Amino acid sequence: MSRVGKKPITIPADTTVSYQGKTLSVKGKRGKLERLIHPDIDIAIEGGILKVLATMDDRKNYALQGLTRSLIANMITGVTRGMERVLEINGIGYRAALSGNRIEFSLGYSHPVFFDLPEGVSASIDKNNTITLSGADKEKIGLAAAAIRRLRPPEPYKGKGIKYAEERIRKKAGKTGTK
């Protein structure tokens, strides 16, 4: 059985969870999220505790049970506390500026690069080189952060580019000249 999937999820007092027709909706102070639940998984809500149940006893359903439990826990955390992801820009002349719902990057190209934030994701920029993405949906934040990182991935020789704050770039030694 799935160890993660068996753990019950406590629903905070200021959050409402409803499950109807394989659609789970979670509503809290930071917004509302909905997710379609796999047909082989069932959900039981009783007394402020949510349990994810596998309908059949096989390996695939236990994996789905653990996945569904993690997704639901992330939804509840997102609508109560919110989620955030931090990116750092390294490199001389590399910077970002926020204008409305769009981020303008100067990344060493001959032109500025623009990135439109998806709906439900907000950004703040600190010191022109630290971007904090925040919102209720962890999946949207992760996809936006990955798309921003792809604009200029960190290179292994000088470490220039956009990286996650917790990411560590392993630098390579450059060429050695022969004499």
Image (cartoon, rainbow, N blue to C red):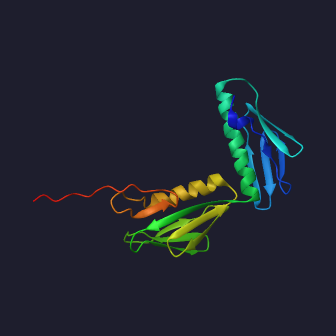
Question: For residue 43, which quarter of the picture?
Answer: top right
Quadrant occupied by the C terminus: bottom left
Q: Reply above or below: 16 against 92.
A: above
x and y percent of residue 104 in the render? 51, 72
Quadrant occupied by the N terminus: top right
x and y percent of residue 27 in the render? 80, 55
Q: Which residue is drawn at 75% across and 49% down?
A: 34
Question: For residue 57, which quarter of the picture?
Answer: top right
Q: Reply above or below: 71 against 178.
A: above
- Seen from the viewer's position, the closer of residues 178 and 27 is 178
Question: For residue 51, which quarter of the picture?
Answer: top right
Q: Which residue is most to the left?
A: 179
- Seen from the viewer's position, the closer of residues 88 and 25 is 88
Relative placement, left or right, of 145 versus 7 is: left
x and y percent of residue 170 in the render? 39, 54
Q: Reply above or below: 34 against 148.
A: above
Q: Which residue is most to the top?
A: 57
Q: So how many labels did they put on this image?
A: 0
Residue 119: tell me if it is visible: no
- Seen from the viewer's position, the closer of residues 152 and 163 is 163
Q: Residue at x 81, y 47 (%)?
A: 10
- Seen from the viewer's position, the closer of residues 113 and 47 is 47
Relative placement, left or right, of 97 versus 78 is: left
